[in-house]
Image (cartoon, grey):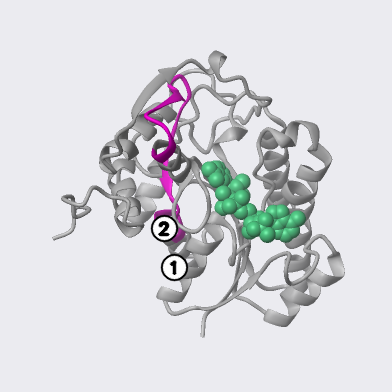
Amino acid sequence: MKKALVLGGETGLLGQALTRALQADGWTVHTLGRRDGNLLDRDFLQGALAGHAPHIIFNAVAWTAVDDAEDRTEDALLLNRALPSMLAQTLKTLGSGHLMHYSTDFVFSGEGTRLWTEDDTPQPRTAYGRTKLEGEQAILGILPDRACILRTAWLFGPGRKNFVSTILGACRQRDAIRVVHDQVGSPTYTADLAQWSVALAQSGATGIWHAANGGQASWCDLACEAVSLAAAPCRVIPIDSADWPQKAQRPAFSALDTRKLATFLGKPPRPWPQALREYLFSENMLLPSDNGGRS
Ligand SMILES: NC(=O)c1ccc[n+]([C@@H]2O[C@H](COP(=O)([O-])OP(=O)(O)OC[C@H]3O[C@@H](n4cnc5c(N)ncnc54)[C@H](OP(=O)(O)O)[C@@H]3O)[C@@H](O)[C@H]2O)c1
């Protein structure tokens, strides 16, 4: 029986999708989160890994509060660098187990308009991006032969608040919302990312992979598409980042090049609008006359 351990598998946006995808694929899945103990306690972590003895460990735990990371960088480092490092070290000591870890498009500067490849040099401009990059480097330094880093972006999916659910929630309260149009990235459906992750894990993939749905969008494009699919009676007004001040300065262009993943899958990841439609359909948020592209 294939055994997986998903850190964050009970509560995380991606963690929950991973748990579902693995169970659907016939894996025995255990989850590990703060309710089970202190993940940052080395003895607890070692005991959990040795006890479950999983073939694959998916680490979907992270400090994901991008703005808060600017002031609480030490706390962000604990989750985004120390935890991945401890995981890799523990698996090295145990001598078994493959590690699937997640990182972010925010490792890139955001300059230019060329899709970012796995070979491009990261140059994070936020504390969050820096802590995530240090996590990647720690893992690849300790466990290069048994670790895979999936850089993903702009996640939406069921089970936890995300940009799309926030936008549609706001549209229920207001007749107009203002959304930034000058930051462009790669919207990604957690269910798709989970499936690619399972496939990569099964093949024993190592190194860095960019994993995102096809196409690119601004936050405003993503909001417009969600509002339109849900037929929400709400106007989406494009605004400049300068008119939406945030503590951490997001990359202007962080869309990911996914050709490496496409070659592995034998087809390109499906376009984000198609994935968005499926998400809204699964949540009963789609315009009633639209069947989500299903027959
Ligand atoms: N969301 C995005 O748009 C995005 C974009 C690019 C990359 N990523 C990466 O994708 C991965 C998954 O992100 P996500 O959006 O699924 O994250 P998320 O929904 O914010 O979930 C984070 C998980 O980490 C857990 N966690 C946080 N602090 C913890 C602590 N001190 N002890 C134990 N558990 C703790 C949370 O548990 P609780 O529920 O108990 O708090 C939750 O299960 C991360 O590596 C992230 O950097 C995400």
**Outermost residue, bottom side:** 1
The residue located at (42%, 32%) in the rendering is 174
Residue 291 screen position, x and y as percent: 19, 55
Q: How many C-alpha atoms fall within 10 Å of the one at disc 1: few (<14), some, or many (≥20)?
A: many
Q: Is residue 183 magenta?
A: yes
Residue 205 screen position, x and y as percent: 52, 59
Q: Give me the C-alpha separation between circle 2 and circle 1.
A: 7 Å
As helix, strand or loop, the secondary structure at mark 2 comes to: helix
**Outermost residue, left side:** 295
Residue 280 screen position, x and y as percent: 33, 51
Does the CB distance between marks 2 and 1 fall below 8 Å? yes
Q: Is residue 126 above or below residue 74?
A: above
Magenta residues (range)? 172-194
The residue located at (29%, 34%) in the rendering is 233
Residue 260 screen position, x and y as percent: 42, 45
Residue pointed to by mark 2: 191
The disc, 2 or 1, on the residue closer to the chain's N-terminal end is: 1
Left or right, 95 with respect to 286, comes to right
